[in-house]
Image: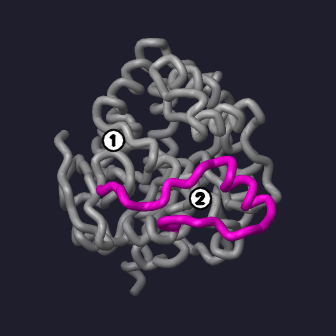
Amino acid sequence: MSESYIEANGVRLAYEEFGSPSAPAILLIMGLGTQMISWPLSLCKGLVAGGFRVIRFDNRDIGLSEKMENAHIPRAPSMMLRSTLGLPLKVSYTLDDMAKDLIGLMDALHLDQAHLVGASMGGMIGQIATARHPHRVLSFTSIMSSSGDPKLPGASRKVVRTMVKRSLGIEKPNLENTMAFQRMIGSPGYPQSDEELKNKVLDSVKRSLYPEGYSRHLAAIMASGSRVKLLKTITVPTLVIHGRDDALVPLECGIDTARHIPDARLQVIDGMGHNLPEALMPRLLELIAAHVGQAGQSRQLAIGRI
């Protein structure tokens, strides 16, 4: 599929869509500094086979979407220190702005309603959009994400050290280092072959390499703070999926997310880390398809009673 471009919330976003335009829509929201191509084609095509229209897109400042080229580039150590001290963070945009991008994308595509599926930071964006625009969301699926509660455990020390080194330029994001980091946060129960991992990294680099966007995404997350109060207002059917072996966003974060969303269902996957390996796609496809399908049926029954 070739990318298309559309203006949403004043930002030019790159997106791809699969399936019939008349089918119920599923929007896939990707995470921190990660391009839409990280949503595996097998998942997109599997959802299409289940009768859905699937739309994946690059968040602002990453991939082929509009870059905030003149914006401030924050540094991770400074942000972490200021956050720890309770000092305000200088950010170019927030997760709320990115949630507005999402709703703007729906507006531009003339989608009155859609099912939202968000991974990691994409889950955070989905949380905000679902809570603030419940009439636009048919169902919500949060994958390997968090409520942002500062009391929750963070990434492992090894992961944090690597992220700080990258932010400071001590460790260059070359092929070898990037593959090593992906293995560090990946799914031990669903290991990726060297070929699969190498191809994913090279495809991402060839399409777009923009570390400045990663830094601004991270700043937006850190400035967002806790979304616990917001989560408690969510009323749409919600599925929370989290890996038991997530070294970047620990399992406790998924448990906490589900705890605060009324009637949310939590699905913990043994052996899953913080990635979307091909071997895990059949399980994710099964969970997401069942959730959005059930939510769609409930919606139709509700309309029928009106």
Q: Is residue 89 magenta?
A: yes
149 or 289: which is nearer to us? 149
What is the chief secondary structure element of the magenta stretch? loop
For the residues labelled 1 and 2, the Cα–Cα distance comes to: 26 Å
SS class of the residue under badge 2?
helix
**107 relative to 210, above or below:** below
Residue 243 drawn at (x, y percent): 65, 38
Q: Which class describes the residues within 10 Å of circle 1: few (<14), some (14-19), or many (20+)?
A: many
Residue sitting at x 46%, y 32%: 281
Q: Nearer the viewer, residue 125 or 238?
A: 125
- Going by the numbered disc 2, the residue's amino acid type is Ile
The image shows residue 111, relative to residue 268, as above or below, that is below
Q: Amino acid at mark 1?
A: Cys
Give the residue drawn at x 18%, y 52%: 4
Residue 158 covered by magenta stretch: no
Task: Specify the color scheme.
Answer: one colour
In the rendered image, the quadrant that contains the N terminus is top left
Q: Which residue is mark 2?
A: 221
Q: Quadrant of the C terminus?
A: bottom left
Q: Is residue 262 visible?
A: no
- Location of mark 1 (residue): 44
Q: Considering only order in the chain, which callout, 2 or 1, is on the residue closer to the N terminus?
A: 1
* Front position in the image: 25 or 30: 30
Camera-nearest label, 1 or 2: 2
Counting from the top left corner in percent of width and height, residue 219 is at 58, 57
Quarter of image, res 223:
bottom right
Q: Residues within 10 Å of mark 2 (few under 14, many from 20)?
A: many
Left or right of 1, for residue 184: right
Segment colored magenta: 66-95
* Residue 192 location (% of width, % of height): 51, 19
